[in-house]
Image: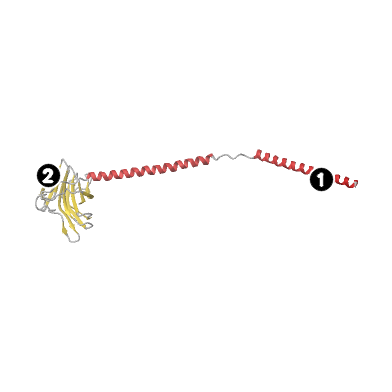
Amino acid sequence: MEQSSNENEMCLTYFDELQTENSSLLLQIGQSDDDDDDDDALLSVPSLPNNRKNCSSYWLHIFICSIIILCLILSIIGITFGSTRISNISNEFNICKTSSISGKSCSYKVLQTLKLMSSTKSSQINNDHHLIYFSSIYIASSNLSIVTFVISKGSNISLTDISMIDTENNTELIQDGHFTSKTTNSFCLCGSSSSVNIITDSTDKYVCQIDNSFEDVRLSQTMNTIDRQKYNISFAWQKSFSSSLTLYISSSK
């Protein structure tokens, strides 16, 4: 019994020593891990924010925003310019609101105006004593159409053979476009009437000569048209070098 008790004590002592050794080993391992962590901490470099990348992204955003703002500004300017341009064209055209001596009125509400032809003072064409013929197809957009010739101040213009023919039935709509009545009574006339005379040229053709020095002269005539119908508008003219002639046609109601 005594020997067995001694053996048990020896076993317990042996296990205590093993436990102590294991604890020491675990403690060393723990310390080693801590040391490794310390070494890692000493060797590791803390990550720094990429300021260059952030800066590039910041300026990229600024650049994109600037482009968007610039496009918006240009769009606004384009719309404003377009509106101004349309307004200027509208102001440039001033229909003659008087009635012709023959009783035809030109005082109708204008819906839309189209410029068919323009010969400015800067034009290099000089067709003195030579008639030039102009012709254009017009598609009516209402049941009333008004043809208007605008002769600017300081111009010397001759007009004849003014015609507007319905292409469906070959019907002439302009009254006295050849000025055979030797008057402008079929036309609404605005401006200095003393500047307008009917003369004959070298071929005995009647022409309306407009030699105005003080104000624009406008000759207009209203015709009944058919919406969406095609019409051929033509006339013959001659001018001095410094003269200006513009032909408009307006839809009305």
Of 204 and 93, nearer the camera is 93
Classify residue 121 by image quadrant.
Answer: top left
Mark 1 crowd level (few <14, some 14–19, many ≥20, 10 Å Cα): few
Q: Nearer the viewer, residue 207 or 49?
A: 49
Report the residue that reaches farthest toward the right.
2
Q: Amino acid at mark 1?
A: Phe
Between 181 and 35, the one lying in front of the other is: 35
Q: Position of residue 242 (x, y in %)?
A: 19, 44
Determine the residue located farthest toward the top in the rendered image: 42
What kind of residue is marked 2? Ser
- Secondary structure at badge 1 equals helix
For marks 1 and 2, the one nearer the N-term is 1
Q: Is residue 131 visible?
A: no
- Circle 2 packing at 10 Å, graded few (<14), some (14-19), many (20+), is few
Residue at 83% from the left image edge and 45% from the top image edge: 12
| Residue situated in front as seen by the camera: 171 or 244 | 171
Q: Is residue 16 above or below residue 231?
A: above
Task: Give the residue number, with chain letter if any, for mark 2.
Answer: 193
Task: Check if mark 1's residue and mark 2's residue have beta carbons within 8 Å.
Answer: no
**Distance from the alpha carbon under mark 1 to that under mark 2:** 138 Å
* Residue 27: image location, x then y, percent: 74, 41
Q: Which residue is mark 1?
A: 15
Q: Is residue 31 left or right of residue 76?
A: right
Residue 78: quadrant of the picture: top left
Q: Residue at x 68, y 40 (%)?
A: 37
Q: Residue at x 40, y 42 (%)?
A: 69
